[in-house]
Structure formats: structure tokens, C-alpha cells
Image: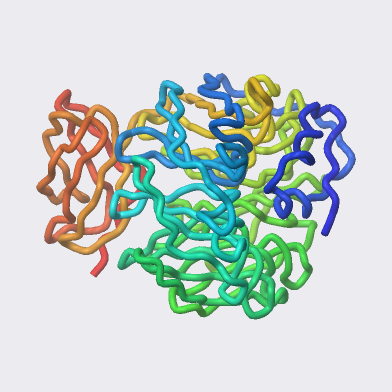
Amino acid sequence: MTTLQIPAQSNDSAALGNNKGTGFHLARLILFALVFQAALTCSAATFTTLASFNTVNGGGPTLGSLVQGLDGNFYGTCSLGGTHDAGTVFTITSGGTLTTLHNFAGAPSDGASPNAGLVLATDGNFYGTTSSGGTNNLGTVFKITPSGTLTILHSFNTSDGSGPYAGLVQGGGGIFFGTTVKGGKNGYGTVFKMTLSGTLTTLHSFTNTDGNAPSATLVQAPFGDLYGTTLQGGANTYGTVFKITPSGTLTTLHSFNNTDGAFPEGTLAMAANGNFYGTTTQGGKLGYGTIFQIMPSGTLTTLHTFSDADGFLSSGGLIQATDSSFYGTTSFGGASGYGTAFAITPSGRLTTLHSFGSADGSQPLAALVQSTDGSFYGDTFLGGTLNTGTVFNISEGLGAFVETVPTFGKAGAKVFILGNNLTGTVSVSFNGTPATFKVVSPTEITTNVPAGATTGTVIVITASGSTLKSNKKFQVTQ
């Protein structure tokens, strides 16, 4: 285990070592001496702090990015705080009204320290993991309704994994896929699948040679294979990128060598061009981490090497937004040393959107999420009114869109469409094929994949005549 070293100018650094429930996340980080470099171009993005956590309603949101619900609000987790200081699940409106949905109680009850975010499933509920607590104090998988009713679906027992730090991804047939950072046959973590009712099957136990400590949420490609990263292990011990089939056949695509990056922790972004984009928390020319592109074949290209000026230690991973650029955060560096939010083009041009200043947040660990109104939402681990974290919004002036849940399905499958101002919607089509639909609320439409539909963009025509396109192509399966 390594030791965390915090830059001297980061006044919030002492709080990191004092917070509970973040041992694994913090203990494996090594930060090097600062290397100053001229700052890159800063964007004219509009930044707004929406809420500050106060410990009572949670604190220290970690690796879990926010997720937009059917009601248009955002849902997330805090690894600390709450009634039992074991973390919380919360919801927050776009205007900043924050409500605690659940207070975790630890072992042997309902789990503790939810470090990952939630996934909105096809049943309209949210699913997530806790890194500790549960029957064996080794972590859990849970379901929570939008109103806050929580059900524990599985408690890990070492043999099937322990300490999940990543969230879940839902694949075909409603099956969830996830990872644990420890446990399994060899103690190096696992990949698992789980049904909606909680039946869990271990797909793979890591051996260290093929990776160690997977802490990022998996990404499923349109044709079924899942892609992810391990924080450590591989040929050079600096972590890996891997592919695994839904049946459990794992292939190591790349082993980092420090020069091209080290210790990838964030979720990969599957881009429209079929390649994957991600970040490493360390390594690269300056030791501050990298942004990379990797093809499904395993060919890796370094797009950007972080410096102190543009931020470093990017642990949350990337998302591809509707302008085709990738967006992410760094936990340290930037103008004040408290981390940044950034955008990077597919060709590698990076722009700093915001440098955090402690009062507006400090050390964002999670990825951003793009709302259907076009803007971005995120949270910070520290900073804000009581130095226990914040929720924020960044607007880049991007246009509104719709999002489908799920992003794939065969003819007849039920699909949720998320958006804004959907009341009075005139039409819904899947790549040009009209679909029957029901407007449930201003933020939700329910529909079914129409017969004859083909893979492509979902288009919604609103009452005002606006055309809203889906942010991802809907994959029609057989």
C-alpha cells in the first residue's frame, strides 16, 4: 500500500486523511513533486454551486457520478455522513434543493460507504453498491426506489468478491454487471453478473497478472462485450484495460507501463467512433496522469499528459457529450490547486472549464454527467460551506437532447425517454420509424421499440416544434 502525498497549496488536504470510509481509494495514490507549466486556455463556462453537504445530509461524495432520474432530478451517493456516518443516497433538483433518501447504517445492516454512483434501471428504480457493511461487512448490492425505499439484494462474502468500488451497468435481459476490488479466488477482485432479484454469479477472478483491483464501472459495447480497467496489476503492475464477454472470457487489451499512464481508476467512455477513452491517475511524462484512446483491438494512444496547471489525478473517467468532446475532472491542480473540470476534443485539445477554489468545491473525484438540458452536473469530495463536499452545475451552452433507458432493445421492448418540456410531444421515432408513446410527465415519455425500426437516433418532436435528438444511437437488437 502506498502513501498519499498532498500538494502544499491544497488547504483541504488534511481533511482527506481524516475522513472515514475512503481507505482503499486514498491509500494507493502517490503524487509527485509539483511541476509548473503555463495554464491552458480557460473556457467561458458558467459555473454554479448548487448545494454544500453538511455531514447530516451526507458528505464526501467519492467516485460515483450523478445520474438523472425520470423526474428530471439527479440522484447520487455520499460515502460519508448521514445519521450513522455510513453514507447516504440523495436527490437534488436542478435548482439545488437536496433531499436525503436513505441513511446507511453499516454492518450487519444495509451497507456503508457507497463510493460508486447509481444506475437507473429499466424498471425505473436505481441500483448501486456499498464498499463495506452488509451481513459480512464486505459490501453490498442494493436497489432503491425514487422515493427512497432501499432493499439489499446481495452481501458479499469474500469468495464472491468484497469491497465493490464501482457501480453497476445493466445489460440485455435486465442483467447487471459489476466488479469488486478485492476477494474472489485469488483476492485480487472479481467481475460478476446479477439478476434484478439479486442472484449473483462470479464471472472472473483476477490473478494480478491479468489485473488487480478493478474500481471503475464497466461499459458494455453494442455487441455484448464489456470493457473496464484495473487499478493495479497487469504485465507492469500499473493497471490494465480489459474486455470480458457476458459469459466470463477475459482478455487483457493493454497493460500500462507508467510512460503511457499508470493506475487507471475511472470509467471508460465508449465513443461514437467505436473506440474507448479514459484517464490514468498517475504516470505519463510528468507523472500526473494521462488521457488516452484505446481501440477495441487494444491499440492505445496517449492524447494528453496532465500538468499541475491543467489539473492532475483524474479518477472519475470521461463522458462523451453531445458536442463530441469528452468531459472530466481532476482532483488536484488548476489555478488554485483544488482540482478542475475540463473538456478535451477527440484529437487531444484540452480546455479547462473551471478551477475549483475550495469555497465552491474541492477535489472532485467523480465523472460529470450531461443533463438533458445540455449542461453538466457533478460533485466534489471536499470544499463548500463545511468542507464536506458540494454539488455543482457547469453550462457550456450546449443544446437540449433526449436520453433513452435502455440504449438498446428489440422490437416491442419498453423504453423510457428522458428530456425536458416534453408535455404535448407530437411524435417519437426510432431512426425514422414512428413509435406509439405516452407522455408521463414533462421529463418522461414511455414508448416501445416499433416493428421495423433500425439502429439510429431517436427523435422527439415537441409541442413547440423543437426537434430533440437522442445523445446516443439506439441499438436495435434481434
Q: At 53% from the left edge and 34% from the top edge, which residue is drawn?
A: 378
Up-down relation of residue 157 to residue 353 (above or below): below
Q: Is residue 342 visible?
A: no
Q: For the C terminus, give its image quadrant.
A: bottom left
Q: For the N terminus, give its image quadrant.
A: bottom right
Up-down relation of residue 389 to residue 300 (above or below): above
Q: Residue 100: x and y, percent?
A: 46, 34
Q: At 78% from the left edge and 69% from the top edge, which residue is drawn?
A: 236
Q: Is residue 327 left or right of residue 457?
A: right
Q: Residue 54: x and y, percent?
A: 60, 27
Up-down relation of residue 308 to residue 132 (above or below): above
- Closer to us: 349 or 202: 202
Q: How is the image coloured?
A: rainbow
Task: Specify the quadrant of the image occupied by residue 71.
Answer: top left
Q: Residue 47: x and y, percent?
A: 55, 21
Q: At 20% from the left edge and 33% from the top edge, which residue is drawn?
A: 441
Q: Is residue 207 visible?
A: yes
Task: Specify the quadrant of the image occupied by residue 400.
Answer: top left
Q: Is residue 112 left or right of residue 336?
A: left
- Closer to us: 285 or 193: 193
Task: Specify the quadrant of the image occupied by residue 58.
Answer: top right
Up-down relation of residue 218 to residue 404 (above or below): below
Q: Residue furthest right?
A: 33
